[in-house]
Image (cartoon, rainbow, N blue to C red):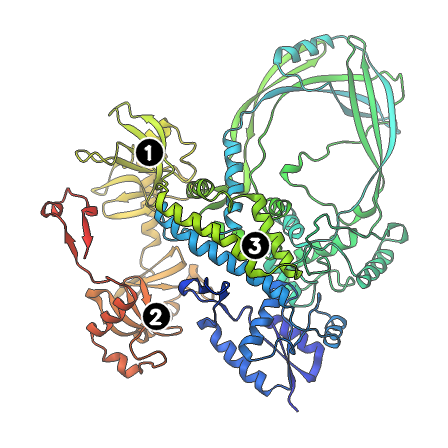
Amino acid sequence: MSKNLLIVESPAKAKTIEKILGSDFEVTSCYGHIRDLEKDDMGIDLNNNYKPRYKVPEDKQKVVKELKQLSKKAKEVWLASDEDREGESISWHLAEELGLDPKQTKRIVFHEITAPAIRKAVENPRRINMDLVNAQQARRVLDRLVGFELSPVLWRKIGMQRSLSAGRVQSVAVRLIVEREREINNFTPVSSYKIEALFSANDINGKPVVFKADGPDKIAQQDAAEKFLASCMGAKYTVSDVTVRPAKRGPAAPFTTSTLQQEASRKLGYGVSKTMLLAQRLYESGKITYMRTDSINLSETAMQDVEKEIKSSYGNNYYQPRKFKNKNDSVQEAHEAIRPTYMENHTVEDEEGRRLYDLIWKRTIASQMSDAEFEKTTAKISMSTNRDNLTATGEVMKFDGFLKVYNESKDDEDGEEDTEGILPPLTISQLLDFREMRATQKFTRPAPRYTEASLVKKLEELGIGRPSTYAPTITTIMKRNYVEKRDKEGVKREVSILKLKNDEIKKEVIAENTGAEKGKLFPTDLGMVVTDFLKLHFKKVMDYSFTAQIEEEFDEIAEGKIKWNSMIDDFYKPFHSTIEQTLEKAERAKGERELGTDPETGKKVIARMGRFGPMVQIGESNNEEEKPRFARLKTNQSIETITLNEAKELFKLPLSLGEYEGKEVAVNMGRFGPYVRWGEDFVSLPRGEDPLSVDLDRAIGLITEKQAAEAPIAIYEGQPVTKGKGRFGPFIKWKDLFINVPRAYNFDKLTKQDVEELIEKKLEKESNRYIQQWPSEKISIENGRWGPFIRFGKKMLKIIGKGEKGKYTPEELTHLSLDEVKKMIEAQVPDAFAKKICCKESCCQKKRSKKSCRKR
């Protein structure tokens, strides 16, 4: 008899489950979503209750075909995609596409890939939950409506890049980063003086121990700080009070998706996407429970396993069972926190996943361990010369409890770590040995820039997004060039220190490094311009509480409380009306900022967004007699913060440095960054190097480095072969061919055989690539991964003209005429071959703008 067919999302999960279920089941993978909305006309029928039109994309057609064949042979089909809304939606799409009845098809869910969990799920199947499907469908439809309607507005009203896009969650995420950046830019540090005194007293062994005591509240002015130190000259310091009180600290709850992302960022330095990728692998291989969850509960079985592990490894006094309660009322379908499936497995074999697994294991164990117990001592120290007191605090750990295993890290926003030390035994009336007193200048600091993890934390606090959306949201805003993740170097700042020692006050000025940050999210100028435009014209979409309210409505759909298309209707009608008004009335956004007047020409200096990014210009574009001068901003400069003097420096480029081997050497800034030009050759400057700091010797050094790197490494058919590293990795060049070098080859030590092999493979591939070519027209018919296609310039177009299902044979394609191919191109790119007609004879003159020409 044929087997049961169980369909899961990933091949790794399929292998693990098939071992558990044995010969009665064939387990296969659908590789995630098998259908998505059509792209034509948004894929949504606006006149029919927003009914979605789904399509199996080309890259999934082979998978769906194989699944259909397997399902026809199977005794019964079971759907076992992930247990969240996305997973429920995948099961529904599978049922629809495979011709299964959603009301009859068995749907199983499990939180962990273990034998008991899988068998229990098979014994207790359910049906597809259409409320969960509709919640996911509502999210997909609403996000498509926002993206497809809002993005073209950005193209027309900002238009720097065709790749501009907007999204319901991504746009508010960018807004958070932009607002934090402006908060930092507008922040004015305020200085004050912190008083600290150092004393010495004997410990229990009679050895002197130096400890610190804090003075009164921060003192605003240096004069006042100096006056305070002067009042302490010749003072005797006596312990006036000692308070000892017990203190406890409890462990953090087990991991949710967002807390795992945050802690992996702090402790391991992982980005959100990397954390989720590794967690997915661990889940699919049966090592941890489901990694998309906002629950902090542990199952009874897990609690028992944790208890056993703690008692056997650490002792009974380290065990303290706990039930954690979610603060968030909208906790979703996933009913358990992220934890190891088997607590007895202390590690895993996978090298990359080991550190993340270790983090999850320790956090889970620690969550059920005893409180850490401390004894906190506070000593008040009086001074004989004034009425102020100094305060010394210290902590002594009496029992480590959960700290034996794990201690949660903190974000920058959480403030400084506790710096309390251990105090020596102190008694009331004890006279202390005074060493010195300091008044150190301190400056207030702005809120830190977001990391990926702290942005996730903020989005979660605001109720924006859900566990499955955080990683793709952050990936999207960086991919769209609205946000960049980078380091920031600190700047030197003078700090004053006053020291009282031996009844003498000395002043000292030191330099401290301030403002250095690592791996933080910075908004780009483009991100700022887009955010301002959306805030001005789409207040509701950019509102944090409204975005959170939308998430709550998705939750209500999942609970069956409201209809999904009614919720979409309430949103879409006013949103679409705003789109139309904005297209009609809104002015083009440039993000312009006037910096001042150029002293040499008396013309305006403006910073703004240009076609290729942020730039400054001298002069106005509407002056036909003399065109404006333009200069690109450096990577660390912004339209919002660049000064007039910094802008003037940019116009020193291009800068001639001299001559080398009879050719001029100059430095300049280009579309892809700063570079050295030597005759007709160009050499990029290393990342972060200021072009204005480059002298002739440095330029010659870069030129000779490039010459050495580009020296022939071999000769093939009488032509030299060179190598280099480009945008897409290492390559070799022969004639006009650029050939990528795979990792299987040692790029630094390529042999003659390697070079010949790489060139021959490329030539063979190229010979099979072109079916027909018309180089002068920039048109060709080529073989692609998914079949033949037309390449027109940089566009890849379909081969059409034989009816909806008819296809040209390879032989027919070789005989297609250029005119026939052009007709196919025009059907997909209207006016592709239209000639430019001049509306006035004079517009053909060189000095006239190209804008005065139009296409017929």
Residue at left 26%, top 31%?
Answer: 619
Q: Is residue 160 left or right of residue 380?
A: left
Could you tell me if residue 723 is visible in this image?
yes
Query: What number is the disc on residue 223?
Result: none
Q: Which mark is residue 650?
A: 1
Q: Which residue corresponds to the image point at 43% horizontal and 32% vertical from the top-left? A: 641
Q: Earlier in the sequence, mark 1 or mark 3?
A: 3
Give amino acid for label 2: Lys
Q: Looking at the image, is 575 positioned above or below residue 606?
A: below
For image coordinates 39% across by 45% down, the residue present is: 582
List x then y, in percent, for residue 179. 52, 37
SS for callout 2? helix
Q: Position of residue 341 (x, y in %)?
A: 74, 64
Q: Quick check: 225 above or below 299?
A: above
Residue 9 in view, yes or no: no
In the rendered view of the protein, which quadrant contains the N terminus? bottom right
Q: Indicate the secondary structure of the residue bearing disc 3.
A: helix
Picture quarter with the C terminus: bottom left
Which is more foreground, mark 2 or mark 3? 3
Q: Which mark is residue 762?
A: 2
User: Which sits earlier in the primary sequence, circle 1 or circle 2?
Assistant: 1
Location of mark 3 (residue) = 471
Q: Quadrant of residue 22?
A: bottom right
* Callout 3 amino acid: Ala
Badge 2: few (under 14), some or many (20 or more) residues near its Cα, within 10 Å?
some
- Residue 407's x, y, as percent? 74, 45
Which amino acid type is shown beneath numbered disc 1? Leu
Whole-Å distance between the Cαs marked 1 and 2?
43 Å
